[in-house]
């Protein structure tokens, strides 16, 4: 299995930001020009970009579409997009614009039939976001916590034709505490789907550790890249 690094471009009001624990009031602006940031990541060798419409995640519909379009125009890197994607029309619109994968989170819990229908129409191009607080699925920009365990959520889509599960430990996201390797690995063992790790990546050694765990196919890198704790080229090399 190829291990992939996904540099993150989180969008708030058209700017590149990082949040702490998903809190919109704890946002740090890292770049004013998302397209330029995307081009820089691609120039350094990134083949994928992980883009999140943060405003959309709370609004339930796209809020940073123009910034995403600029990103798509600025680079040939493949883009996976998440944030407030809760209808088939929204999914189709992103694919028409040129994104490679669509990430569904809140709707995967409230409307699993949507995920199945989208994955049937677009095999291996739908990613299910499994965001966790204390092992339970969090939705609506992580503002709400359900009573559904993350493993149960993942198992619902094992036969749906989705590309992967994106697992985020919300309590670590944006805090440079380190990825929750054990929880990510436990989910990967429990389901028959590839898992992408997310939330808190802080050191190159974590990439090397994640690579060795069965079923984990990649990791999201955000604040650690922007703060210079991890060099992107070194991180990409660690993935090989």
Image (cartoon, rainbow, N blue to C red):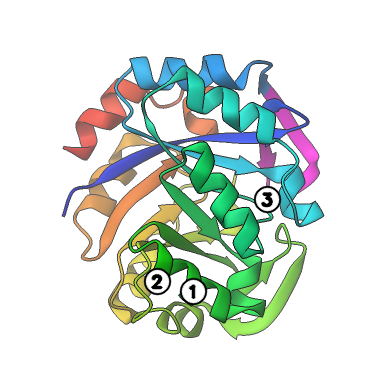
Which residue is labeled 1 in the image?
A: 117
Number of other residues with Cα within 10 Å of mark 3, as a class: few under 14, some 14 to 19, many 20 or more: some
Classify the position of the N terminus by image quarter: bottom left
Which residue is labeled 2 in the image?
A: 120
Q: Is residue 89 left or right of residue 130?
A: right
The rendered magenta stretch, by its main secondary structure, is classed as: strand
Q: Quadrant of residue 70?
A: top right
First in sequence: mark 3 or mark 1?
3
Q: Quadrant of residue 122?
A: bottom left
**Residue 239 picture location, percent across and down:** 22, 39
CB under 8 Å between callouts 2 and 1?
yes
Q: Is residue 231 above or below residue 19?
A: above
Q: Find the magenta span and give its range.
A: 17-29
Q: Is residue 19 magenta?
A: yes
Q: Secondary structure at mark 2?
A: helix
Q: Residue at x 60, y 84 (%)?
A: 148
């Amino acid at each position: 299995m190829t291990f992939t690094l996904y540099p993150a471009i989180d969008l708030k009001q058209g700017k590149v930001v990082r949040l702490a624990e998903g809190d919109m009031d704890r946002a740090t602006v890292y770049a004013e020009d998302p397209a330029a940031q995307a081009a820089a990541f691609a120039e350094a060798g990134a083949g994928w970009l992980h883009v999140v419409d943060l405003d959309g995640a709370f609004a339930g519909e796209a809020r940073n579409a123009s910034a995403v379009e600029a990103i798509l125009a600025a680079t040939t890197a493949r883009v996976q997009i998440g944030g407030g994607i809760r209808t088939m029309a929204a999914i189709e619109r992103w694919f028409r614009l040129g994104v490679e994968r669509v990430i569904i989170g809140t709707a995967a819990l409230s409307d699993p039939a949507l995920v199945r229908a989208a994955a049937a129409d677009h095999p291996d191009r739908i990613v299910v976001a499994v965001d966790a607080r204390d092992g339970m699925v969090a939705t609506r920009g992580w503002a709400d916590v359900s009573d559904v365990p993350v493993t149960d959520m993942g198992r619902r889509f094992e036969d749906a034709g989705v590309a992967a599960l994106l697992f985020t430990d919300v309590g670590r996201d944006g805090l440079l505490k380190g990825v929750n390797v054990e929880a990510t690995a436990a989910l990967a063992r429990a389901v028959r789907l590839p898992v992408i790790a997310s939330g808190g990546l802080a050191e190159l050694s974590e990439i090397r550790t994640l690579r060795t765990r069965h079923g984990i196919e990649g990791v999201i890198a955000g604040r650690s890249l922007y703060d210079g704790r991890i060099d992107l080229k070194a991180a990409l090399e660690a993935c090989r």
